[in-house]
Image (cartoon, rainbow, N blue to C red):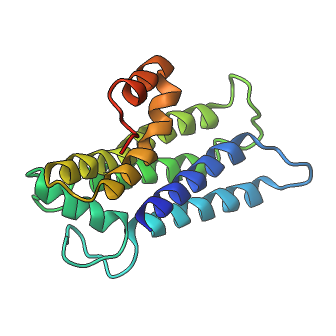
Amino acid sequence: LILGAWMQIYHHLYTVLKTCTDHIQGLEDETRVAMMEVDIDKSAALWIGRLQSHGDNTRGTMLYNLVERTAIHFNQDHGEAEVNTRFLALLNDIRQVVADEKCNGGGTDASNTGYHQLYKLFHQIVGVMNIPVVQSIVHYVAIDADPKLIELYLLSVAPQLRSCNMDYFNYLVTDVGLLAM
């Protein structure tokens, strides 16, 4: 469930980025802004979930709560986990770029400042989203959890490793046996 939600958040945020450069014939700028705002809201809803209180690691159902619970294992349980604070701040930054209508009338040329700002924010927020996944891997390895659970988390970050450095990814898979659980 959590990794499925993670992928949906990624999809919604990527859709915001893509919509910034898509100038569909006959689609008003206000409609495009509204479409991007809906994807941002969906991302926030999937991250926060329901029954969640600020900094609470005992209730909640989605990634915000996972981050709060994971923070305990890394001595980061001091109010709201830093990952949640950073994710929500970056999401608000994305919302502000969209609200300021910086994507309107653009395209993919160098003058489309909205796209360039969203591109940078998108990569920053994905990096923040990866933190609880990597922390979960470390925690589950440390407690000798079910190898299938560890493999599930590894599979969620492996494609990103591959896209960064194919040689290093191949080393991890063949020599280290990263995905040979």
- Do we see residue 124 in this rendering? yes
Where is residue 63 drawn, in percent x and y? 36, 63
Q: Nearer the viewer, residue 70 or 170?
A: 170
- Do we see residue 100 in this rendering? no
**Image point (46%, 23%), residue name:** 170
Quadrant position of residue 174: top left
Where is residue 105 drawn, in percent x and y? 77, 40
User: Quick check: 178 left or right of 166?
Assistant: left
Quadrant position of residue 124: top left
37 up-or-down from 142: above or below: below
**Image point (68%, 62%), residue name:** 34
167 up-or-down from 62: above or below: above
Residue farthest along the bottom direction in this orientation: 51
Where is residue 46 drawn, in percent x and y? 46, 67
Q: Nearer the viewer, residue 10 or 134?
A: 134
Count how many numbered circles sit on residues in the image. Answer: 0
Quarter of the rendering occupied by the C terminus: top left
